[in-house]
Amino acid sequence: MSSGIQRVMCEEDIIGQKASIVYESMLKHLVTFLPLPIGRCNFIETVTNVSCHASGPFEVHLSSRGTGTVIHWMCSKGHKVWVCNSQPTLKYGMHAGDFMMATNILLSGNNYYKVAHLFNYMNMGFLGKDTFFKIQDTYCIGAIKNVWEEKRSAAIQRVKNKDGIVILADGRMDSPGYCAQYCSYTAMENDSKKIISVVTIDKRQTSRNSVIMEKEAFVRTMDKLLGEVKIAEICTDAHTQIASVMR
């Protein structure tokens, strides 16, 4: 079987490239009239070592894989003559669209399940949950942490020598009520409007008591920032536990 698959060789091959929604019926209509660079099947039987040599026209088959479509041209004897993908592929055959979808769901702050639900309503192919989290763990989390540390260090350097800065801070739970599992506490420098700290607390770090997670996150935020910058004032919401700590 021969291949017309395009490989991704550098980031410019996928970053910033335009993409479209393509209906399979239109794609099949298009490729039916596409001349192949080979006129005969070059399949070789492994046992007899005999070549097929069946001539065209070849039958076109489309199959969905992730966010892309794989196109196969089959000879009259059922051998795959040519294969092409609707997307360029990365190492190990991953579709570029699957990679870009997984990374951009994360970077845009979206939720995998909601986007997958949308694609299901559209009857469009989508990457599986395991693939999404594998891409996230392998390629995204480390890179995002590195960028965040670089941005945070630059923001701290800009306010490090100020006599006293004003910090605006607040926490956000991952769910309402007393069943929250995580609390993310964010601190921003008032003048520059730059985020200079993000602390995430797991309920398991507070003996599974979600009520005190925000206070714990506040304490950790202040412990770190007090060693880096000179704080004159900190503004939060009316949180009784944080008020108690401040007193």
Image: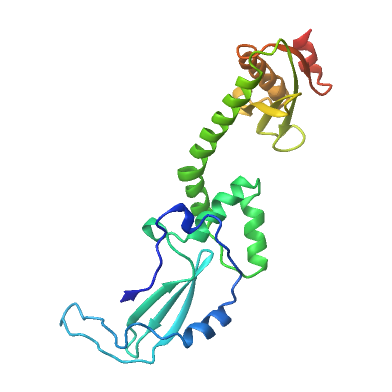
**Location of residue 165 with respect to 119 vertically, above or below:** above
On the image, the x and y values in percent for residue 110 come to 66, 49
Q: Residue at x 71, y 20 (%)?
A: 215
- The answer to whether residue 207 is seen in the rendering is no
**Location of residue 202 with respect to 122 vertically, above or below:** above
Q: Residue at x 41, y 86 (%)?
A: 35
Where residue 228 sits, quadrant-wise, is top right
Q: How is the image coloured?
A: rainbow
On the image, the x and y values in percent for residue 109 come to 65, 45
- The answer to whether residue 50 is seen in the rendering is yes
In the picture as drawn, the residue positioned furthest to the top comes out as 247
139 left or right of 76 in image: right
Q: How many marks?
A: 0
Please state, as top left, top right, bottom left or bottom right, where the N terminus lies in the image.
bottom left
49 left or right of 9 in image: left
In the picture as drawn, the residue positioned furthest to the left comes out as 48
Q: Residue at x 38, y 56 (%)?
A: 91
Relative to the observer, which residue lies in front, 57 or 122? 57
Relative to the observer, which residue lies in front, 128 or 52? 52
Q: Residue at x 54, y 64 (%)?
A: 67
62 left or right of 214 in image: left
Please state, as top left, top right, bottom left or bottom right, where the C terminus lies in the image.
top right
Where residue 26 sits, quadrant-wise, is bottom right
On the image, the x and y values in percent for residue 75 come to 35, 87
**Location of residue 26 with respect to 223 vertically, above or below:** below
**Location of residue 148 with respect to 126 vertically, above or below:** above
On the image, the x and y values in percent for residue 188 come to 71, 26
In the picture as drawn, the residue positioned furthest to the right comes out as 238
